[in-house]
Amino acid sequence: MNPRSLLLHAYVYAVLVFILLPILVILPMAFSETTYLTFPPQGLTLSWFGDFFTDSRWMASTWFSVKIAVLTAITTAVVGTMATYALVRGANAMGTLFQAFLIGPIVVPHIALAVALYLFFQNAGLSGTTLGYVLAHSVIAMPFTVFTVAAALTSVDPALEDAAMSCGASRFNAFRLVTLPIILPNVISGALFAFIISFDEPVIAFFLAGIRDKTLPRMMFDDIEQNLTPIIPAIAVLLTLLSILVLLAAAVLKHMADRNKGAEGQ
Amino acid sequence: MPQAASPHSKGALIEIRGLGKRFGSVVAVDDVSLTIDAGEFVALLGPSGSGKSTVLMSVAGFERPTAGQILIDGVDCTGLPPNKRNIGMVFQHYTLFPHLSVGDNVAFPLKMRGIGKAERRRQAEQALEVVRLSGYAERMPKQLSGGQQQRVALARAIVYNPRVLLMDEPLSALDKNLREEMQIEIKRLHAELGFTVVFVTHDQGEALTMADRIAILKAGRLQQVSPARSLYERPSNLFAAGFIGEMNILPVTWDGEKATFSNNQDIRLPAEALIEPIRPGAAVLAVRPERLSVAAPGEAGTWKATVRDVVYAGAGSLLITHLDDGSEVRLRMPSAGQANVRSGDTIGIRMPPEAVLLYPSGDAA
Amino acid sequence: MPQAASPHSKGALIEIRGLGKRFGSVVAVDDVSLTIDAGEFVALLGPSGSGKSTVLMSVAGFERPTAGQILIDGVDCTGLPPNKRNIGMVFQHYTLFPHLSVGDNVAFPLKMRGIGKAERRRQAEQALEVVRLSGYAERMPKQLSGGQQQRVALARAIVYNPRVLLMDEPLSALDKNLREEMQIEIKRLHAELGFTVVFVTHDQGEALTMADRIAILKAGRLQQVSPARSLYERPSNLFAAGFIGEMNILPVTWDGEKATFSNNQDIRLPAEALIEPIRPGAAVLAVRPERLSVAAPGEAGTWKATVRDVVYAGAGSLLITHLDDGSEVRLRMPSAGQANVRSGDTIGIRMPPEAVLLYPSGDAA
Amino acid sequence: DEIVIATTGGLMRNTLEEHMYKPFQEATGTEVIPFDIEVPDQWARAEGMVRSGNVEFDIVTATGPDLIEKADILLTIPCAELENVQKFALEGACTDKGVARTTGGMVLTYNKEAFGGKEPKNWADFWNVQEFPGPRGLPDTGDRDWWVPAVALLADGVAREDLFPMDLDRAYKKLDEIRPHVAVWWKTGNQVQQIMRDKEVVMAMSYSGRSLATIKDGAPLGMAWEGAIRDTGYMSILKDAPNSEGALKYIDFFYGNSEGHPPFIQTVGYATSSSAGLQKLPEEEQKLYATYPANYEVLVDPDFEWIGANRAALRERWTAWLAQ
Amino acid sequence: MKGPGFFEADGRQMSKGAILLLMGPFFLLVFVAFLYPLGNLLSISVLEPTPTLANYERVFDNPIYATVLLRTFRIALLVSILSLVLSLPVAVLMANSRGPKAVLITACILLPFWSSVLVRTAAWAILLQRNGMVNGFLQAIGLTSEPLRLLYTQGAVVVAMTHVLMPFMVLPIYGALRNIPPAYNRAAAICGAGPLRTFWEVTLPLAMPGIIGGFILVFLTALGYFITPSLLGSPQEMMIATLISQQMRENLDWPFAAALVGVLTLIVTVITLIFSKVFQFDRMMGGRA
Ligand SMILES: Nc1ncnc2c1ncn2[C@@H]1O[C@H](COP(=O)(O)OP(=O)(O)OP(=O)(O)O)[C@@H](O)[C@H]1O
Ligand SMILES: Nc1ncnc2c1ncn2[C@@H]1O[C@H](COP(=O)(O)OP(=O)(O)OP(=O)(O)O)[C@@H](O)[C@H]1O
Ligand SMILES: [Mg+2]
Ligand SMILES: [Mg+2]
């Protein structure tokens, strides 16, 4: 390795340490016996996991978050795939509008969106409701789903559907039997993205929290602000495991998608 | 080898009447009328963007014409969606469904027609046999070579015995050897099964060797529809003349009998040299390079020319020469018997009057 | 038209010695030795994956050979990085820098060589003039057509007067007309500027018409290096024979004087028919379709054959015939003077002994 | 049947749940749904609810000024009709718009080990960075827009009785002095505990209850009651609350549940305004609470009317000063 | 050399009705959960208490709000620059790596990306505590004898925000770098450019859309960032998001909060429009592939 490359590697690995360090530091604290967070953690206990799994408030919020995230994933997958399909397969004219609407919720600061939603949902009686969360989270997760699906859809030769129709399939069947199976891995990984985004959304949840139901991030925010007990690292451990699972799932799906697409040849 | 539709043909008659198609302000197809006989093999040939695909897609039902009608066996199907037309189609990039096995790909049209599983499998296997791929049903498309994939696409297009087979540059993604193999395959299937074929290509050699008739398109308009030989030997206008094969184009003055060149040499032309009547005055003489031959300079009835370049090209060689007035004339001759001509030589060019065609000047370039 | 390097050539001599390149277990190039004279134009021709690009990239310095040496003008540059080799190169997809104007693209190599701005601009403009694009300096690459872009790439490759110009399928992305135009352009530049050219192509026509010598590669090994004519007329083995142009291949028995066919007809061959000495026994006879001609059936010294197909292909027509023993023989003849032969006819095939080549049987297919 | 009670989370909610909500539920069958929320957020919520007419909270937690400021959205409490309130509530505990729940003080809390035996006694000492060096903590929550200027005035020598109406210019001039020494603007009770415990600061204005809890945990902290600001949390009922009946019942129950008060006070660190409350604790322990007479005497008794009337200006001034 | 973007139709046209049917739910969703609420909020800013621009005047009259805005800009800019400095080499190495190394780097970038923002922020809170690891480290190497105040400072906010937002910088740059055909590097080399020169003259300019895109994305996100500043920052160095939240939640001055949102939205929109050419989110996220 020449000196230039050595320097680059050294720099990059230093940056990677910077990226990983906080997470590596916080994870072991989940096993600490102290009620506050110190490094290195003292003692070794699983009781914080126990606390998390037995505290009805944490459990309720976890399930609430899971419910919202699943619904958000389904909503974005269905709505996003429909819209993307229309767009990639023809609605040229709406492209700009679509893109503006899609990107809007990403670039408009979440605090602004949260405040706006708060006001509107308060009036509409959606504040804190599952529907309210799903609507809000779908809007901010949509771009990620759409771009994942669009990436697949644009690489599917539209002639495949023509071929299906020339074989006697209706337009809908051509989509259902040909296009959908091919892009399905991407649709699912797009849905996974949406799931994670919803599951990890702190800002809007901060404003929309309802009377009974709080999302997990909202609970975590409160705990960080108020207590900062090792239950946070315990959750971090669980979330990290979940992310690894999801990333693995996404990798498998990508592999499948590549396999599906491979046949177009040239 | 123009080959009439066999009498026991099961192909359909296709009538395209005054077909027009606009995309916004772009006129892709302009008043194209073409009748394709049952069992005939017609090639659509033309430069890129001339509307070949649009015509084909209108027949298939993927494009809705903005004018005109498409009749198949006398039935107007202008407004019918593609899945109701019962037409077989082969696309440029195979378009096999990548997630389905070869067998399932071929069986797909049968599935759409509600045919039971066992029967589907049987018919698909039969179709694969026709394209000489029996035993490949279990493979996935990407495990096949390009040529094999295109054969599968062919099997899928014919499995339900359509009476019309449409193909949009089906061979252009294949390399030379595979292409030739597939040309033969397609011709064989056409002869065996007797369906009507409309075949889009931009390869003139392919069109000339495969089709019963060739339709030449330019900018959405039909230029000529003829069998290969008359297209090559009597192109109906300068565009067709220049588009198919090589052609020397020389400005002349026409007096009704003789064409006079700028150096005042002239040539008396038989009546057949004129595709259509031409008024005396400026005209254009066209002659194919392989119809010219080298003579001794100054020999009677030859043109004096200077050889600029001799390009060896295997079977044939190309002579690039200049006439006195600077206009370029190309000659093609077999390399084997080639006279020993070198760059810089002065030669005579012999031009048999029966090889010459005359067009009005200013005709489409 | 083999054209010797002009004596005042400023091209460099390239010596490739025992070049080998492996990628893991794949042997891409295997012991290739080739000396390219100063100012010579050599084409590398071969099927896909035969190692053409790898040879070229080794000369350019992008691939580090696993064996052998590359010398340019006697200097060993096997280990030199590409930016130190002072070689011009044109890539298949133009690879103009999209963020730079045409002028800046052409001036880029000069900038890398530390030449001042004004001088850069002057020389770039000059190079653009050479490729007939003066006045285009301000445009961005994507505002040009494919052919123009490739001309800019050419200008960029020659602007610093390299003594070697490498080209990897520079024309394969262009359509037929542009390709022919660029072929002429490149030949012209070569003649004018006199650099050494190594040109990769998979188009045999291109190789035949452009190169002084053609090197045929197969599976990483050099098969033959010859000028076009001797390559076409005396291919050194069956692979080269089959790869360039069309060739009829017939099994025969050779007794040292005559080649005997399965039907016991024989032909006496001149000594020149043998590229290398062949032991009596099974051998293979090769003859190009355009060297065969049609005679009356039964005429002396002809082979009896049945016509299976007559394929009209414009300037020429192809006769596909069968000999008695079932082997296929193809004939090519001009369409114009074509004898009136039809499918099913019995004909005689005349085979001039001087057109015949004989190869040991079992030679590379 | 259910009532929703909005109040701060953590210790307060837990303790209320144990000593009040559960007994109330057992006694009446009315379920209490606690909603953890910081007081300012609670008002934002309430505002939204009132705007939309979709009120979800029954009981909210109000500070003194809130009773004035938010009077239009609060139900008037019929003090006379609440039996137990009549019976147990101390003088002044039941007002028009709210009934006192707990009283504490915003008290100067310091680390006893930080100044080599010296102990700060009042806000002037808080400002005295020469004698008492080290980082300070001040609140950035709830009522800091008047708490902090008020103690600044005290530090500048204004007498407790003369605080209101406040001379804001003078207060902020004094605040400029301390600003560089403020290391943490704490937002929650837990946070002030944590910064005191972890020695992020040596001195802070803190909820007395929180200081008390930290002391009980063993931290070497002391409290200087002189000039601490009385901080009473009131239970108020929103107009149009879904179950104002139940809410009133709960308030009445709160006072009636006498045996709950002493353990509640001990756990939460704040005294209730019930005659069955603080007095039941050992004398020594009583001293740690704001309502212990010796402490109560030196507290600042804020002029809620004035504060409520000038709240917007107070806030704007505070934000402007803090964020500058 | 680039293919058609995601939003250029290339299929056969669908009927208007079908398109509307398919796009309908999307537009409805966006309307209900984005456009209308935002519009409604902005309308409050000009309609309450009476139809007036007073709320906006206030934003610019009181210097404190301008101060907060400027500070927010400064911090966002700082975060973006820091992210760029840290990300560019990472993206370069990532784009030039194959096999396990590439997987390692990608995983390092992506894993935190997918682990909760809150967790990461909490981690920084722990690291930066007075008795936290960073102070421990600084004391151990003798840079300081007393633990430094790190938490609740602007520095903490900048570092943590950089940490949280870095993936948004790495991915677009990586995507842009990966989209540069290697042929350009070869062309540059054959023209006589060494590796550094090639990077500077060819790679960097060609990756510019990704770099600018990533920069803008990080900058915009940082502008409105709420979580990290509110957990790690000091109110003394308040950012606009905290101010909006405060106006909304504590001061209950919704019209004014709405005006602040309006100003922020306007700024963001203008920046997005100015850079719309390079701000192609699809391409940027394409880097993930
Ligand atoms: N969907 C479309 N929208 C707009 N214009 C179109 C569309 N499809 C085709 N065109 C235009 O119509 C004309 C004819 O196109 P068509 O595809 O039929 O040509 P073609 O002869 O098949 O060309 P090629 O040989 O390149 O395939 C062209 O000018 C083309 O640009
Ligand atoms: N980077 C590489 N890694 C592994 N194998 C390679 C690599 N580059 C080339 N090869 C292999 O080396 C052989 C020669 O490749 P090369 O690209 O030189 O062929 P080519 O003659 O240029 O073919 P084509 O006409 O398709 O361009 C092929 O088998 C190819 O798969
Ligand atoms: Mg086409
Ligand atoms: Mg190659």
Image (spheres, coloured by chain):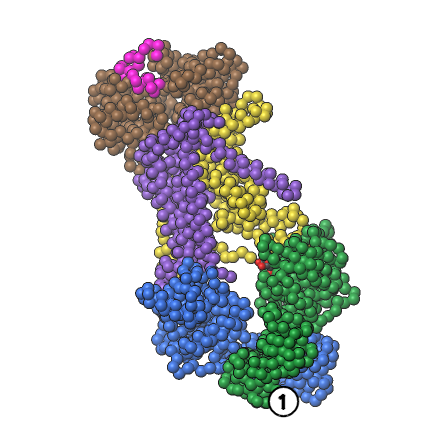
Chain colours: A purple, B blue, C green, D brown, E yellow
Q: Quadrant of residue D77?
A: top left
Q: E17 above or below E75?
A: below
As rendered, which of A214 and B273 lies closer to the eye?
A214
Task: Name the residue: 44% across, 25% down.
Answer: A43
Residue A64 visible in image: yes
User: In the image, is residue C1 above or below residue B291?
Assistant: above
Is residue C313 highlighted in magenta?
Answer: no
Image spot of residue C169 (x, y percent): 62, 63
Q: Chain of mark 1?
A: B
* Image quarter in which the C terminus of chain B is found: bottom right
* Residue B153 visible: no
Q: Position of residue A91 (x, y in %)?
A: 42, 58
* Residue in view at x 64 percent, y 79 percent: C255
In the image: residue A188, left or right of residue D21: right
The residue wearing badge 1 is: B268
Is C170 placed left or right of E42 in the picture? right
Q: Residue at x 42, y 66 (%)?
A: B135
The residue nearer to you, when weighing C9 against D235, is: C9
On screen, E215 above or below D2? below
Between D239 and C10, the residue placed more toward the observer is C10
Residue at screen point 73% across, 57% down: C71
The magenta region covers D262-285
**Based on the displayed image, in which of its 4 quarters is residue C1 positioned?**
bottom right
Q: Under tag 1, what secondary structure?
A: strand
The x, y position of residue C45, in whole percent, is 63, 66
Amino acid on which the number 1 mark rests in the picture = Arg
Q: Which residue occupies the foreground of this view, E275 or B103?
A: B103
Q: Is mark 1 within 8 Å of ligand 1?
A: no
Q: How many marks?
A: 1
Q: Locate residue E216, reporting x and y percent.
A: 52, 43
